[in-house]
Amino acid sequence: MLRIAVIGAGPSGFYATSQLLRAGFEVDLLDALPTPFGLVRAGVAPDHPNIKAVTRVFEKTAAAEGFRFFGGVELGRHVTPAELLRRYHAVLYAIGTTTDNRLGIPGEDLPGSHAATEFVAWYNGHPSFAEHRYDLSAEKAVVVGNGNVALDVARMLVLGSEELAVTDTADHAIEALGASRVREVTVLGRRGPAQAAFTNPELLELGELSRADVLVDPADVEATTQDDVRATNRKNVEILRGYAARETSGKPCQVRLRFLRSPVEILGDGRVEAVRVVKTRLVDGRAVPTDEFEELPCGLVIRSIGYRGLPMEGVPFDGRSGLIANDGGRVAGQERAYVAGWIKRGPSGVIGTNKKDAADTTSKIIDDAEAGRLGNPHALEAPAAEAFLQDRVPDLITWQGWAMLDAHERAAGEPHGRPRVKLVRRQEMAEVLGAGKVVA
Ligand code: NAP
């Protein structure tokens, strides 16, 4: 029996696991967190419960024979890639792209300027971000970027307390967002409406917010170039044109979408006070700065310009793309090592995109197995592999452990009409598990 360690229990890790189990492999699915589901738990916006329902598919995978989950195992801290390669027939990295792209402009690190990656992890109750604090006392916020994460962040900033109260937003974030004074959120695109990376349903949803009007300058939409753009982009322009034609209805908040503006500096004396932008024009699809500048006063900046991977010792990394160096899913220059998901192809697509992406990698694993390329005389049987991990991580969380945490969270949410109340601190999780000690 060939045994594979899949690292990362997000969508790619789960899709790959399911495909490998069906092909007859045994899979140990490892995650740094005590909880599974990656960005479905810690990234997808809490007001999108339908997207989170994909976890039901992953739960079926977890019930299949040959599956084991080991939470709390941090690669590079508890075990190294080389140690796993020695003990399994193959290792598949599905570790996602965990950090943010940088704007590379002065003032980027002023207090009040934050990466969307962290803000999203904070409101979703990721344990590593639970202690973060966001000053939401200013009326104006700027979100940089024109992707779906920027829209998630803009929405979360203007949802009402009663809307948040029925979601699985972390309690600390419900409290902070409930007391927020933010009333105007400006979402900045460095290119035009036809180049925005929003998808249509997400852009439409922005126009249906109960507490916020969406504002678009008609001149921005009319100035757009639509040559060679995809149907999604053309539909976005249509939606934006509709927004530009709307009368404001006097809702307490506003989400303002502004285009052809690129931040050049975040200004402030000790903390964020404004964003200085240069107006841009499109040349061959690229945003080229003009000599016109503008200052947008604000007390909060969320930079939402995409994710990138972090290098890890023992795994070849392509610093330019921010991804694990690979050839269609086979890790470059290493035998029996594979990669899937965002850390393989970059942070793009929706959750389902990772199913096909994982299949492209798992088909190579299957080919390599059939060609006898996964032979490893040191590979451990299941009990020995567990003992090895248990030795490194005394508070290892199994699927049964997660099931206890899951049941606890759901039961806590039920009386309040919430899908769950998330446990966000490792100590709280340990207490639920009856261990009384810190989890991983
Ligand atoms: P994204 O879709 O790649 O968008 C990144 C945005 O940042 C782009 O508008 C990009 O503009 C802009 N940008 C990059 N560098 C910039 C710079 N230096 N200055 C100004 N703007 C800059 O990334 P994302 O929003 O992080 O989303 C990641 C993936 O998750 C996407 O595939 C997204 O659709 C998906 N997602 C889906 C949902 C959903 O389905 N509900 C929700 C969240 C995320 P340029 O195009 O000009 O480079």
Image: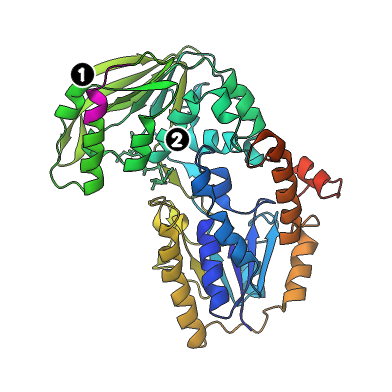
In this view of the protein, which residue sits in the foreground, 284 or 174?
A: 174
Which quadrant of the view contains residue 276?
top left
Tag count: 2
Label 2 sits on what residue type? Asp
- Above or below for 342 versus 368: above
Q: Is residue 346 visible?
A: yes
**Residue ID for mark 1:** 292
Q: Point out the residue furthest to the bottom here.
A: 371
> Mark 1 falls on what kind of element?
strand
Image quadrant for the N terminus?
A: bottom right
Residue neighbourhood size for the residue with mark 2, other residues' Cα within 10 Å, grouped as few (<14), some (14–19), many (≥20): many
Q: Which mark is residue 152?
A: 2
Residue ID at (36%, 34%): 145
In this view of the protein, which residue sits in the foreground, 282 or 316?
A: 282
For the residues carrying marks 2 and 1, which lies nearer the camera in this image? 2
Dot 2 beta carbon under 8 Å from ligand 1: yes
Q: What stretch of residues is rendered in magenta?
A: 241-248
> Could you tell me residue 396's position as x and y percent?
76, 57
> Could you tell me residue 342's position as x and y percent?
45, 55
